[in-house]
Image: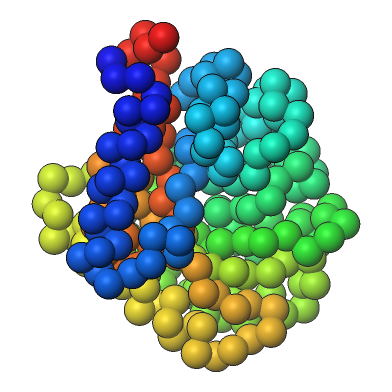
Amino acid sequence: MEPLQQRIQTIEEKISQACERAGRNRDDVTIIAVTKQVSEERARDVLDAGMLHLGENRPEGLLAKQHAIPQGAVWHFIGNVQSRKVKDIIERIDYLHSLDRMSIAKEIQKRAVEPVDCFVQVNVSGEDSKSGMTPEETEEFVSALRDYDKIRVIGLMTMAPLTEDQEVIRDVFKRLRILRDQLAAKKMQHAPVTKLSMGMSNDYSIAIEEGATHVRIGTALVGSESEGDG
Ligand SMILES: *Cc1c(COP(=O)(O)O)cnc(C)c1O
């Protein structure tokens, strides 16, 4: 398998090309290296290779990686979180990508000391298997968060369906961008909603063409333990 530096370089090239096609600035896209499938050691190598933003999707994984990497990283929690687990992670993360219900918001309000930068997760594709609220529910939910001073809604997050059909994927990203634009236009003080967390290993180029500011890349960047990379 390719060494880490080479993988990063390949991804950087694709991101630059996607930015160029879309007339966007490379600096407006943040890569989150999703380390959920690899060891603490591998996560540290990823940080040493210059990837400062790391993403985990389970509290246990987050704690294990943070134990191995006490400083230097920016932490993104990208997975579905149970209300009773919010207290375990909320003071340990820089961004939450998966705010998708009021029970989580209430728990953040109760447990956080400082305001937390959150993305509201939207199930644009409408698949049963996906977390997130419907696009129709999103505006009311975001508005209601004005009473929660421990939550800052900085953007929206979605996951594209698992399909080879690039146009289906593109349409999902496009719809999230339109929803983002509608919410941003409301200029809510607690909810600037300027960011878009979308795009994974298989679809980050499309996501960037459609306006992603945060791409969450796992297997293409860090590999997975089963690949047996050294
Ligand atoms: C695992 C995961 C990713 C990364 O997926 P890859 O296909 O490995 O790039 C991104 N976002 C979320 C929410 C994930 O759970």
**Ligand 1 placement by image quarter:** top left
Residue displayed at 20% across by 65% down: 21
Q: Is residue 36 above or below residue 23?
A: above
Q: Is residue 39 above or below residue 136?
A: above
Q: Is residue 167 left or right of residue 45?
A: left
Residue farthest toward the right in the current orientation of the protein: 113
Regarding residue 12, the answer to whether it shows in the image is yes
Regarding residue 132, the answer to whether it shows in the image is no
Q: Nearer the viewer, residue 104 or 117?
A: 117
- The quadrant in which residue 191 appears is bottom right
Quarter of the image for the N terminus: give it. top left
Q: Is residue 53 left or right of residue 62?
A: left
Residue 35: x and y in percent read 51, 30
- The quadrant in which residue 209 appears is bottom left
Q: Is residue 174 above or below residue 225?
A: below
- The image's colour scheme reads rainbow
Q: Is residue 216 above or below residue 113?
A: above
Q: Nearer the viewer, residue 106 or 97?
A: 97
Residue 116: x and y in percent read 73, 60
Quarter of the image for the C terminus: give it. top left
